[in-house]
Amino acid sequence: MKILTSLPELRRNLRNVSGSLGLVPTMGSLHEGHLSLVRTARKQNDYVAVSIFVNPIQFGPEEDLNIYPWNHDHDLGILESEKVDFVWIPDTKEVYPDGYQTYVTVDKLSSHLEGARRPGHMRGVATIVTKLLIVFIPDRLYLGQKDAQQSCIIKRLVVDLGFTMDVIICPTVRDSDGVALSSRNIHLNSVERNAAVVLYRSLCESQDAFSNGESDAGRLRTIIADVLCSEPLAQPLYVSVAGIDTLQELQHVSDTALCSIAVKIGSVVLIDNIVLEDS
């Protein structure tokens, strides 16, 4: 496994890649959710690359950049055991040199959900992913369903900018109680962690209702909100039932929809989602 920090050495090493390359972009603090992406990439490609970069431009001025968990030794040990070929760990100035002023925005898709809650966040995501795609030129890019809006934006970005790689969306990985794995879960105390099960439970209630014939999107939102409000520690920030490709709120679900939620528990904001599908 080659650990690289500068753009020139990354480019030199990538020139020697003679087969397919899969890229897994991360911000580090790796867990089984990330590793599911790495393992899928390992099965589908001759080479696997992982980037570890806590992207400052996707954090707002009052968000948790300074407390985002870092553990490079832990991450590198895991990636080596997974037989990753390249790990890129640049510093901020390597990615955003002095005077940096070029950004990528996917307008409409960035105006909903986390984009509305965190102004500038999706611009930061789109910008760093574009830079990674330009540098790595992977055959396949691996993303998690947990960050559904990001995945939707990046798929649009790839089409709009004429990139040729496949975007592979892998299922959300959950603990045994249904809580979606997230690097931010470490900031929950034991009581808050127990309360976090309400997120997936609320989404499952909407899935059950949809499977039983409920297609009114407003009613589905109410079902999710009612379950969330049954947990005293849960503060819902948004509840969405939207088009899976447009992220626009629906009035009626005909065959498929994306149910997305953001919930504050203690000081931590957790997001989760499921896809409703007509079986």
Image: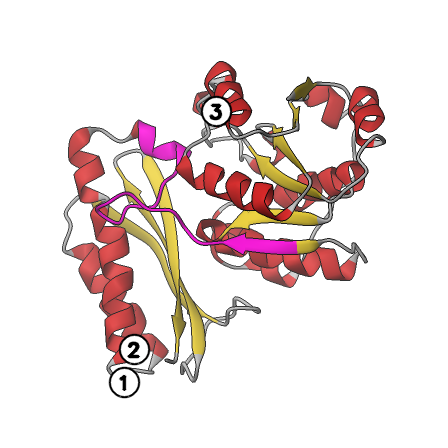
Q: Give the amino acid at mark 2.
A: Phe
- Which residue is label 1 attached to? 213
Residue in the picture at 68% in, 20% down: 2
Q: Nearer the viewer, residue 188 or 73?
A: 73
Q: Residue 152: x, y in percent?
A: 58, 59
Q: Are marks 2 and 1 in contact (CB under 8 Å)?
A: yes
Q: Are marks 3 and 2 in contact (CB under 8 Å)?
A: no
- Which residue is label 2 attached to? 210
Quick one: SS at disc 3?
Answer: helix
The stretch in magenta equals 167-186
Q: Residue 210: x, y in percent?
A: 29, 77
Label 3 or label 1, whichever comes before in sequence order? 3
The quarter of the picture where the N terminus appears is top right
Q: Give the amino acid at mark 3.
A: Ile
Quick one: SS at disc 2?
Answer: helix
Q: Nearer the viewer, residue 125 or 180?
A: 180
In the image, taking residue 146 as reference, residue 47 lies left or right, namely right
Q: Is residue 108 visible?
A: yes
- Which residue is label 3 attached to? 78
